[in-house]
């Protein structure tokens, strides 16, 4: 499981919106030096908003705004998503090129673009209708209450 800490910014019926800084996962990634997401988030200090669905152990109603929560995503979801988004369009584009390569250079370039677009359409249809959406959604793992304020509990400094 990939885990990330974040702060609750909104609570809905069966999910919460969590503000995260994707740095803890980025630090473990082999591509962190050349990754666009990591570079942009480090440069801009951008925090991501993620909708995390409730689980049997942590319900959305257990969370309050400003609670610190841990969300999780199965590694299999990242692997399946990466293969689907990167491999399928490329496979369609290469297949289209192989089918029309004897018709000339223009037809080959056009076939690549059309094959790539068809691959993205297949990815969209697959993720929309065939694959269960729940397998790709982040889930609430645990809730960590914000620390209570201990400032000014009636202590007076004497000189």
Image (cartoon, rainbow, N blue to C red):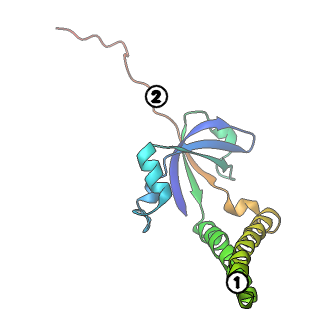
Residue that mark 1 sits on: 97
Residue that mark 2 sits on: 148
Task: Check contact, mark 2 vs mark 1: CB within 8 A.
Answer: no
> Which residue occupies the extreme top position in the image?
159
Residue 158: % across, % down = 20, 9
Could you say which quadrant of the image residue 154 lies in? top left
In front here: 9 or 26?
26
**Alpha carbons under labels 2 and 1: distance apart:** 63 Å
Q: Could you tell me which secondary element the residue under label 2 belongs to?
A: loop
In front here: 124 or 77?
124
In front here: 124 or 95?
95
Residue 105: % across, % down = 67, 83
Residue sitting at x 72%, y 75%: 110
Residue 108: % across, % down = 70, 81
Residue sitting at x 66%, y 42%: 16
Which image quarter is the N terminus in?
A: bottom right
Which image quarter is the C terminus in?
A: top left
Ranked by sequence position, the earlier of labels 2 and 1 is 1
């Amino acid at each position: 499981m990939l885990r990330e800490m974040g702060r609750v910014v909104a609570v809905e019926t069966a999910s919460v919106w969590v503000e995260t800084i994707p740095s803890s996962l980025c630090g473990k990634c082999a591509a962190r030096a050349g990754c666009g997401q990591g570079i942009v988030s480090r440069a801009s200090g951008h925090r991501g908003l993620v909708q995390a669905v409730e689980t049997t152990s942590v319900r959305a109603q257990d969370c309050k705004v400003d609670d610190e929560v841990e969300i999780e995503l199965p590694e299999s979801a990242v692997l399946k998503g990466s293969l689907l988004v990167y491999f399928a369009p490329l496979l369609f584009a290469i297949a289209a090129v192989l089918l029309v390569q004897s018709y000339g250079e223009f037809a080959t370039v056009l076939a690549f673009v059309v094959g790539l677009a068809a691959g993205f359409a297949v990815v969209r249809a697959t993720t929309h209708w065939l694959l269960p959406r729940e397998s790709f959604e982040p889930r609430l793992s645990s809730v960590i209450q914000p620390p209570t304020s201990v400032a000014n509990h009636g202590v007076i400094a004497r000189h």
